[in-house]
Image (cartoon, grey):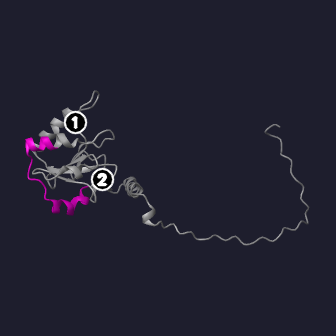
Amino acid sequence: MRATEQLPRRALAPDRVLPDTAPVGFAQTALAVDPEHVASDMVDLAARVRSLMSLQRQDALQLPLGGHFFDIVVTASGPQAYAVMAVLDGMQQAEGDRPGACGPVIEDPQRSWLVWLVPPGTSDQWGAHRHALCLGRPHHVALPELTATEPPGPYWLRPCRGDRLVPPVPLRQLLDQFRPGPAPHETLLGSVLSTIS
């Protein structure tokens, strides 16, 4: 059959009577799910999807720490902290990398802090430290826009990359060596953490 030919049509009687049909009804279905039946990683996923949707609307991206993404180490900024970052730049430099190869670091100039993104679970192993505070669950962090690379406001001193985080063991050793200070107080940090954006 060629594409231009009409398909055959069934002849219908003009006085044909259609049978009665029942009215169509749509039942309301509850979409609420019992939290006990949701896997913990799915709760994390839902929170992250909502955050990414906020980012698309150019709202602040708020992420829960821990899970599958990252924890954070917060230190004072300044020459000693920049020296730590310079050493990590060299350690994490791979062939073809542009300068500044250290994992992601946010600078908050208003509070004189650096926020180092480290692997999730680091906060469970970190312990007390004189020059830094490490946080994971249940805290949240608001990240600057990915295009924010200079003040005003918090910005990416080292870019957020998909292929690396700051390695926590060398970071801790270098913080012991260079001693940036003063370290932020945990209560203060917890109270303002989600406003770092």
Q: Nearer the viewer, residue 76 or 99?
A: 76
Crowding around mark 1 (Cα neighbors within 10 Å: few <14, some 14 to 19, many 20+) is some
Q: Position of residue 187 (x, y in %)?
A: 16, 63
- Per the picture, the main secondary structure of the magenta-coloured stretch is helix
Q: Please state which amino acid type lies under the numbered disc 1.
A: Gly
Q: Position of residue 26 (x, y in %)?
A: 64, 69
Q: Is residue 90 above or below residue 191?
A: above
Can you say which quadrant of the picture contains the C terminus? bottom left
Q: Mark 1 touching mark 2, by CB under 8 A?
A: no
Say if residue 167 shows up in the picture. yes
Figure check: 121 above or below 192: above
User: Of residues 1 and 150, which is closer to you in this image?
Assistant: 1
Please check the rendered image and state whether residue 176 is part of the magenta-colored stretch, yes or no. Answer: yes
Compared with residue 138, is residue 105 higher up or lower down, i.e. above or below?
above
Q: CA distance from mark 1 to mark 2?
A: 25 Å
Q: Is residue 190 left or right of residue 42?
A: left
Q: Is residue 108 in view from this perspective?
A: no
Q: Is residue 37 left or right of residue 3?
A: left
Q: Which residue is mark 2?
A: 66
User: Closer to the camera: disc 1 or disc 2?
Assistant: 2
Say what secondary structure mark 2 lies in. loop
With 167 as the anchor, is 35 left or right in this view?
right
Magenta span: 172-197
Residue 159 to residue 190: above or below = above
The residue under the point 15% across, 55% down is 111
| Numbered mark located on residue 100 in the image | 1
Q: Residues within 10 Å of mark 2 (few under 14, many from 20)?
A: many
Q: Quick one: quadrant of the N terminus?
A: top right
- Number of callouts in the render? 2
Q: Position of residue 81 (x, y in %)?
A: 12, 44
